C-alpha cells in the first residue's frame, strides 16, 4: 500500500538572457520578483493552486518541467501577463524548446551539460 502521494513535478523558470520575472500566488501575493540572469533558474514552490507569471523579455524565459525545457514564454522583448504556471498547462501550451531556434539557449544548455560531466582519474 502507498501512504504518501507522489511529489509534485519540479517546475522552474530559466532565463537565457537577463529577464525580469514576477511570480504571484493564486491569492495575488508576490512569491518571487527579480531579474533572472542568463542561466539562472527559479524553482517554483509546490502549491495547491498554480502561481502565475508576468515577465519582460519573455522570449528569453523558458520553463523546465521535470528537466524538460518548454518555451519560450513569449516573443522577443515582449511582456507576458497572467501566464498560469500549472504543469499540465505548460506542457499543453508550449512546445519542447528547440535549441536551434535560440543560440543562447543552446549555449546555456551546453554549459550546464559540461558542468555535469564527471571525469574519472587514472
Image (spheres, helix red, strand yellow):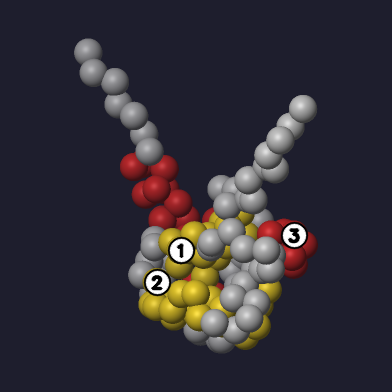
Task: Give the left or right position of residue 87, taking residue 66 as reference.
Answer: right
From this view, report whether residue 30 is shown above or below residue 99. below
Which element carries disc 1, helix, strand or loop? strand
Which element carries disc 3, helix, strand or loop? helix
Quadrant in which the C terminus is drawn: top left
From this view, report whether residue 53 is shown above or below residue 108. below
Label 1 Cα crowd, 10 Å radius (few <14 / some 14-19 / many 20+): some
| Mark 1 and mark 2 residues within 8 Å of each other at the beta carbon | yes
Asked whether residue 104 is in view, the answer is no
User: Where, by quadrant of the figure, is residue 11 drawn?
Assistant: bottom right
Nearer to us in this view, 8 or 22: 8
Nearer to us: label 1 or label 2: 1
Which residue is tagged 1? 42
Nearer to us in this view, 11 or 95: 11
Q: Which label was assigned to residue 106?
A: none
Instruction: Name the residue at the left extreme.
Output: 122
Q: Which label was assigned to residue 36?
A: 2
Residue at point 77%, 27% (across, down) = 1
Residue at point 59%, 76% (across, down) = 25
Which residue is tagged 3? 88
User: Where, by quadrant of the figure, is residue 73 drawn?
Assistant: bottom right
Image location of residue 51, percent across then percent down: 62, 72
Image location of residue 77, percent across then percent down: 51, 84
Label 2 Cα crowd, 10 Å radius (few <14 / some 14-19 / many 20+): many
User: How far is disc 1 from disc 3 in space, using C-alphas?
Assistant: 18 Å
Amino acid at each position: 500500500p502507498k501512504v504518501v502521494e507522489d511529489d509534485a513535478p519540479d517546475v522552474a523558470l530559466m532565463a537565457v538572457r537577463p529577464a525580469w520575472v514576477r511570480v504571484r500566488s493564486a491569492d495575488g501575493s508576490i512569491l518571487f520578483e527579480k531579474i533572472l540572469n542568463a542561466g539562472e533558474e527559479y524553482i517554483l514552490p509546490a502549491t495547491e493552486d498554480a502561481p502565475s507569471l508576468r515577465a519582460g523579455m519573455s522570449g528569453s524565459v523558458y520553463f523546465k518541467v521535470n528537466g524538460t525545457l518548454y518555451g519560450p514564454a513569449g516573443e522577443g522583448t515582449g511582456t507576458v501577463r497572467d501566464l498560469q504556471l500549472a504543469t499540465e498547462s505548460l506542457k499543453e501550451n508550449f512546445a519542447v524548446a528547440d535549441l536551434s531556434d535560440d543560440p543562447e539557449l543552446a549555449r546555456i544548455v551546453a554549459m550546464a551539460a559540461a558542468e555535469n560531466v564527471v571525469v574519472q582519474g587514472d
